[in-house]
Amino acid sequence: MLHPLFYPRAVAVIGSAAEGKIGHTLISQLVEGGFSNVFAVNPKSQGVGTVPGFESVSVIGSPVDLAVIASPASTVSAILEDCGKAGVKAAIVITAGFSETGNIDGEIELKAIADRYKIRFAGPNCAGIINNHHNLSLTLETVPPLGKTALVSQSGALGGLILSWAEEQGLGFSKFISYGNAADINETDLLEYLINDSETEVVALYVESVKDGRRFYEVASRLTKTKPLVVIKSGRTESGRRAAQSHTGSMAGSDAVFDSVLLDCGAMRVYNVEEMFDLCKGLTSLPPLKGKRLAVVTNSGGPGVMAADHAESIGLDLAEPGKRLREKLSVFLPPQCALKNPIDLTVEGTEEGYRKALMAVLEEYDAAVAVYVGTPSLASGPIAAGVCQVAMDTEKPVVPTFMAGNTVTEALKRFKECGLPNYATGERAVSVLAKMAEYENGKQKEAALLKYDGPVTGLPARGQLLEPEAMTLLKENDLPVPRFLFALNPDDAVGAAAEIGYPVVMKVVSPDILHKSEYGGVIINIMGAKEVEAAFEKIEDGAAGKDFRGVVIYPMIKDAREVILGLYRDPQFGPVVAFGMGGIYTEIIGDIALRLAPLTQKRAAGMIREIKTLPLLEGMRGQKAVNFDLLERMLVSFSLLPFKYPDITEMDLNPVFLKEDDIFVGDVRIIRA
Amino acid sequence: MLHPLFYPRAVAVIGSAAEGKIGHTLISQLVEGGFSNVFAVNPKSQGVGTVPGFESVSVIGSPVDLAVIASPASTVSAILEDCGKAGVKAAIVITAGFSETGNIDGEIELKAIADRYKIRFAGPNCAGIINNHHNLSLTLETVPPLGKTALVSQSGALGGLILSWAEEQGLGFSKFISYGNAADINETDLLEYLINDSETEVVALYVESVKDGRRFYEVASRLTKTKPLVVIKSGRTESGRRAAQSHTGSMAGSDAVFDSVLLDCGAMRVYNVEEMFDLCKGLTSLPPLKGKRLAVVTNSGGPGVMAADHAESIGLDLAEPGKRLREKLSVFLPPQCALKNPIDLTVEGTEEGYRKALMAVLEEYDAAVAVYVGTPSLASGPIAAGVCQVAMDTEKPVVPTFMAGNTVTEALKRFKECGLPNYATGERAVSVLAKMAEYENGKQKEAALLKYDGPVTGLPARGQLLEPEAMTLLKENDLPVPRFLFALNPDDAVGAAAEIGYPVVMKVVSPDILHKSEYGGVIINIMGAKEVEAAFEKIEDGAAGKDFRGVVIYPMIKDAREVILGLYRDPQFGPVVAFGMGGIYTEIIGDIALRLAPLTQKRAAGMIREIKTLPLLEGMRGQKAVNFDLLERMLVSFSLLPFKYPDITEMDLNPVFLKEDDIFVGDVRIIRA
């Protein structure tokens, strides 16, 4: 339970209470916040003002819920031990000098002590917490305006930056917590706590990595059913990742996996702090956006067009107004106004014009952006009042973009009063709306991962699996493997080919050869016995000097579309399934969909529909669609393998052949631990 | 010559001079600006203060360089005529109600009058001009701070927005002009004028469309050799485009062509006004960025990593510091600092730390970003002073990102004093640097388009060209066409196939059939006489009811890579060449390069290297590269065709077969006017 962390009835601050020191500042903030059960703890038993000083927590003599520790690193474990003995329930370890500087043992010790006494703690190496609606500030960071967004930050500095920028950006916060090295409380614990926090409507999270990817996934999925989760995940690229390692000593996993996890669990990823502010402002102050149809109402062509351009490029629907709406608008708008989308009121856009136009478009559209370019000579206040009126009279998002700063100060004041977020540009406003639509849409997704509860076994052979062994394993696990036969010599091969039926494909079998084509180890379209013999000889020659075991023979599959199924274990998230279109284009374009395994058929379906080259599967130029049901079911079976066979570390089915009503594994590679 | 527009010795303002009217405001601004030769012109001969009033320009009696016209639309042509008689050299027609509202004839008349009297004019329907270094403001828009950026805007409202935001955004301007409907002076005239304007170092342009795409291309290319050109082009997407049409009555051409033109002529496209401000600030106040190696120096892990992430994702090189630099840094930085890139000075980053670290990294890197997260308790001024010092002592860009607003006011003041632009986030700072690197790189490009001065002829046949006719035309124009023969009947076909050599391909010839495959009109891999006869019969059957002319026979080309060459006429830019990889992937992924025709071999080479699927041509998995020289030369020959044959409106070579040392047109389609 993290409750005592945010709602302590008594707090001890451990560390120097001398003026200018952290302890002194935190104690002063507690007193200012109206807390009375506050205790200073330091070797000199020095108090601060009316707050009494003690040598240790255990000598205070009355119950303490929360200990805030800012004393030197070498003292922290003894202090935590003392706190445990005194019945402390939660702690914040601000002190640095643990795993982030290589002192891993020190951090393990803290965790062990805390576990022994059932203390939950944030840190070490963290910036503290704020519970804003209860005047609790246990951090040196700026206290932001009151609001409905909770900020959870792995980086204290980044958290501090957001808090100190909050007033200027116009976003209020309910809670803030910097969890530092996450020796005990981590990002997922906090997300879980915030699910039921009635003061929080939106959660903003800054992470570089997560401790337990699967639990993060589960909790984030649950959270997003009722509260939007906005995530900045850094360490995206190669240099970013390296810096993230040196920053918190944590191991950042593959960014692409993280990205697909966020998408799949309904969280919204943003890429910088300004985007985070924009989105949180929208989410906390606008009604939900149910749909993608957006109208732009403007007094100025240029900015209106730019907003529309951007909206369309990020997937919103800027359909033209229908006949009924055009008729309605034409009744009260001057004739020179463009009754298109954007609806251009021209410079003559008035309070009444904006109000009536917005009300009218919201009957047909799901949201509206009100773009207004001010001129020094025009009063923007009344026009803003019109926009506010519409926002109150409808349950759809109405988003003002009144520009620029100084020419519309009156309007900005009005918006602040009526709680509407104003955006600096139309592009920023529509970016927020696109994310809001994405959030509503994401609520439809499955929350929990399928649990694998089948048997767990070892792989059937030692060492690298040969192709026939791997194919047999696939077959036993309901994966669609074409008929195949293994042959040790040319005579057997001829018999096998005849049994399978010409034309056939012949491939080398050797534990030494991973990339068969490079050794001439794959011969296709073999038409008869003579060719089989020649092919066998050629393959055997190609494998000269290698451990040649024979050949495997398949029917030749023609005119099929090809896809790739992959599987690997991510250090943060565990088994991940990859799906993409076959061929070298996938490699170049990087058009691949990822999901945590195991998959349900619904998840598999979503994954297949995510790739850009989907039209190839749906059928182009008169070609029929592939059988999606077969492909989805194959993905589901495939996604169970890493759980049944813990020895499998990586696996590729490449290619998988798709015919209109059939599906076959074309080749397989299993990498074992 | 546009000189009198910006540097008039005498100005007449035509339109009501009553208080509150435009004429009155402009005259007052002229007087405030220190201009003495100012005249008010209106039916009542009303003056403003010491400025005398006249009934018409011609009765003023002393020379007038510039007339500013803000009188009703119906009066403008007579006024312009009068101005012409009085020897006026330039005019600004603010008055609206011309082509943008359908009054095209009125606009044509203005242009005719101006041409007759050799008056150059801006507008109609424009917002006026500012010549900021000379206190000349002939617009109702806000006068921005002084600076080195000239703003040219097709939209008056967008221009006004930028000007009114300029002070807050910290960007100064040299000149501003809104050219409205561009009946005479257009964006290109203004770019050309600004090439030699000594008060302008950077040009910012807002356009929805250009009047003469090729001239725009030529002039922009010349401009960017010495001055950066930053462009917002709106009307990008379908809804944007429609609004652009209704906005200025202009026809926006394909956005992809515009985009490739900007890239090719060394201009920098940005997508919103904030990006424009960011980039112009960087370009006017930082030294040129010669290279892509960027170091990030920070006092805070999170924001540093985020800047590095973004920098890498947009193509900057965030290489780790070399051994020498690490040694150097380790001498004066505390041991806990990360000697990686980002270089993390930790919260203990001091003035000296930043100064020394920045100086040291700039010996190895091309630019540095100084990220600093302020806390309320630390003085940011001295640290900013250190950064300014480095900026002065080096000729490389040093870009501060001091965050956030209120916690670093001291620093922001310092940066303003020393002329360094501070960015709100590291992501914005590195975006600017990436564009600056792109600009320096673009200077290497060819400026002028090749001029076609060969013969101009009609197409050789009437109506739609049949495939053999089209192939013959290609051959005559040095395009690599494989050997082919035309056959009227099965017997001829057998002879032709034998002559070409088996295997062959046979295709239908019919003016009624554009998509041959749909009618079974293409049969490949024909191995002998019997097959030829059968194929002929099948093709003739497929063409039943059509005008069947015979078949054309080619050698079968195997194991080739396929590309597409296309050609079409853009309404703004004329003939455009398209190049892409063959197959349906190109359609789905949209991986295509565009260039204005005709091409030089250098341009063709650049175009080929632009596509994402280039690795396929360079050779993957042991495959050799194609012969790029042959492909480039083919593109050059191809690009001349629209000039030699004005009747060609569109053309596709799809596919073109590429072998390691050969190249062949696989199929051709020519659309004639």
Image: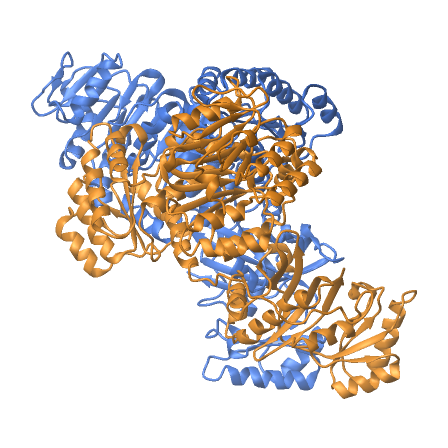
Chain colours: A blue, B orange
Image side of residue B449 versus residue B443, left or right: right
Q: Is residue B634 left or right of residue A160?
A: right
Is B91 placed above or below A134 here? below
In the image, residue A318 above or below residue A453: above
| Image location of residue B413, percent across then percent down | 26, 32
Residue A497 figure quarter: bottom right
Residues B87 and B89: in front is B87
**Residue drawn 50% across the image and 68% down it:** B602
> Which residue is farthest right?
B545
Q: In the displayed structure, does residue A20 sit left or right of residue B20?
A: left
Task: Look at the image and tell me whether residue A285 can be seen.
Answer: no
**In the image shown, does A292 or A312 lie closer to the viewer?**
A312
Image quadrant in which the N terminus of chain A is located: top left
Determine whether, in the image, residue B5 is placed left or right of residue A124.
right
For the residue pair B552 and B460, the one nearer the viewer reads as: B460
Q: How many marks?
A: 0
Counting from the top left corner in percent of width and height, residue A529 is at: 69, 84
- Image quadrant holding the C terminus of chain A, namely bottom left
What residue is drawn where x is 74% and y is 58%?
Answer: A623
Residue that sits furthest to the left in the current view: A44
Does residue B230 lie above or below B326 as drawn?
Answer: above
Q: Nearer the viewer, residue A181 or B116?
A: B116
Q: Could you say where residue B71 lies in the image, as x and y percent from the top left?
A: 59, 26
Q: Is residue A469 visible?
A: yes
Name of the residue lying farthest toward the front: B61
Q: Position of residue A337 (x, y in %)?
A: 66, 27
Image-quadrant location for residue A164: top left
